[in-house]
Image (cartoon, coloured by chain):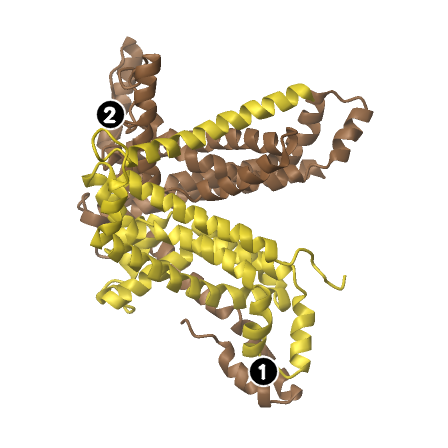
Amino acid sequence: MTDLPFSDQAVAGKTAPPAEARSLRLPTQWLGVAPFFIFAIMFLILPTLYLMLGAFQNDAGEFTFNNIVGIFDPPNLANYMQCQYDSWMSWVDGNCKLPSILAAYWISIKISLASSLIGAFAGLAIAIAIVRGGLPDWIRSATLTFSGVASNFAGVPLAFAFLATLGRLGLATVILNTVFGLNIYAHGFNILSFWGLTLTYVYFQIPLMVVIIVPAIDGLKKEWGEAAATLGATMSQYWRMVVIPVIWPSFLGTVILLFANAFGAIATAYALTGSSLNIIPIVLYAQIRGDVLHNAHLGYAIAFGMIVITGLANVFYIWFRTRSERWLK
Amino acid sequence: MKAGRFWAWVVFALGAAYFFIPLIATVEFSMRMRRGVYSLDAYKVVLGDARFQATFGYSVLAAIFTIILGVLIVVPAAYWIRLRLPQLRPIVEFITLLPLVIPAIVIVFGYIRMYGSNSPLPFLATDTGTNALLVIGYATLALPYMYRAVDTGLRTIDVRTLTEAAQILGAGWGTIVTRVILPNVLIAVLSGAFLTFAIVIGEFTMASLLNRPAFGPYLQNIGANRAYEPAALAIIAFAITWGCMSLIQVLSRFAPKSANRPN
């Protein structure tokens, strides 16, 4: 499969006159893209489809919705709803427990959403600052280079870096405690928590945003600002009517990409928290490693759910994008 | 405009602080191994560890095979689409973006289920097969970056004229791709390659689930069992990523700047 399909053609091409070459045209049309499509189908599309089909089958291969229902864990979900209802009626926090797989999805969605939104806005601010803020040129190129590095600095090493910074003995924790007298751990902060993980994810989300959004901001022509000013637009009108509509599609697209990026990430969280914070990739990881749910097809259903969520995010993106493109016309 | 510049500096300074404090903290922590004084002991321990050398070597080898596989798949496809099948472009672009949307853990889960020992294609039955599957998985993860890099490279050259000129001179397809197109997009391919290298070196999920002795699972293992070595390893990993990105920057200076197309 690593064989170049051109090799026979190379031999044929050297000896064959043009007329014969033309008769070979139909197969050669597809030979160049064949390795790509075979690879994509075998190692990207089929494995995904296999899991998606498996989510709707039982061990005997019969069609069933039980795996999908299993994710929602109906008896426990009913308990949860009852508990929520009771605590709402009595104004007391009932400390209700969502079924564990749903809880894992929910915390994953929250972390991905929080880190992608924080990353997107912070990244946008930095991108605008370095492109339009009148900073020296070297800052722009240094920031872009650094962003290229930091956006790829995810996974296990990133977890180590944040443990060294915000862990119990981390530099930032110690300095805040000794210099400012602020013990963040006494105030409920924990690197192994929702905010700890979000703050860590933001480290690769912001640079990714910067790398993707800078070209879009570069695309804002100076003339548009001048034209708006000539027509008497205020700064806020210029931003509201020119800048935001133009960069909106790329901004939204990047947020979705950042969301998917965080949603599928496991290495950072696994190295940081072991299995103490149950985000959905860690649940799936444990399931693949040890069949902890005692039902292989429930694993398929979890994977299916992850694809549905990232897929839905992209459907929203395409929908928003077509709408905003209509406005741009 | 003065106020604008002030706020730009504030934003930049805040960003710089957020990005540099963890790096400084990690360097500081990595040097605390010997009590009371700063030393490079943690680095010495890490670099002298036989498992570090073995796993790192394994991952470097995997990265090299990944790059070769990626080039073999992506370069002919990208070239052919520019030359003959532009109508396939949206489909191919969509496919190359899929690995950014489908989580790596889902992809590798699919592999484990589809290519197990008693499947028609039993990749996982042998060690060599599992290694091959890992490389294939890495090539999938690198697909978005590789394709974009090569496609950008092809945009700067006149694919059609080069191909026709080569054909008139009697070159076959193999010669055209390897001796005409590839040298012209070599710099683009290389930047894709370094990015692939940076991604593969520390990758954890696939290597761990396929039980391969790669650098990522080793990092995770050290992180769970040691105190100061992980910080040293994080700095080493950051330096490797930095090295790859600097090479891309250097290479991009040599890349052809403008498209010299007929129209």
In percent of the image, x 32 and y 59: which residue is there?
B134
Residue B246 visible to the viewer: yes
Q: Residues within 10 Å of mark 1 (few under 14, many from 20)?
A: some
Please state which of the two labelled residues, at mark 1 or mark 2, is closer to the viewer: 1
Chain bearing tag 1 is: A
Chain bearing tag 2 is: A
- Give the residue at the far right of this rendering: A230
Question: According to the colouring, which chain is yellow?
Answer: B
- Which quarter shows the N terminus of chain A? bottom left
Residue A69 visible to the viewer: no
Q: Secondary structure at mark 1?
A: loop
Front residue of A244/A303: it is A244
* Tag 1 and tag 2 share a subunit: yes
Which residue is tagged 2? A97
Residue A284: % across, % down:
27, 44
Q: CA distance from mark 1 to mark 2?
A: 66 Å
Q: Give, as a three-letter code, the residue at label 1.
A: Leu
Q: Give, as a three-letter code, the residue at label 2.
A: Lys
As drawn, B131 above or below A102: below
> Residue A24: which numbered mark, if any?
1
Q: Which sits earlier in the primary sequence, circle 1 or circle 2?
A: 1
Residue A243: % across, % down:
67, 31
Q: Residues within 10 Å of mark 2 (few under 14, many from 20)?
A: some
Q: How many marks?
A: 2
In percent of the image, x 69 and y 22: which residue is there?
B1
Residue B158: % across, % down:
68, 65
Residue B262: % across, % down:
76, 64
Whether the residues at callouts 1 and 2 have beta carbons within 8 Å, the answer is: no
- Give the residue at the far top of this rendering: A91
In the drawing, does residue B100 fall left or right of residue B31? right
In percent of the image, x 19 and y 43: which residue is there?
A293
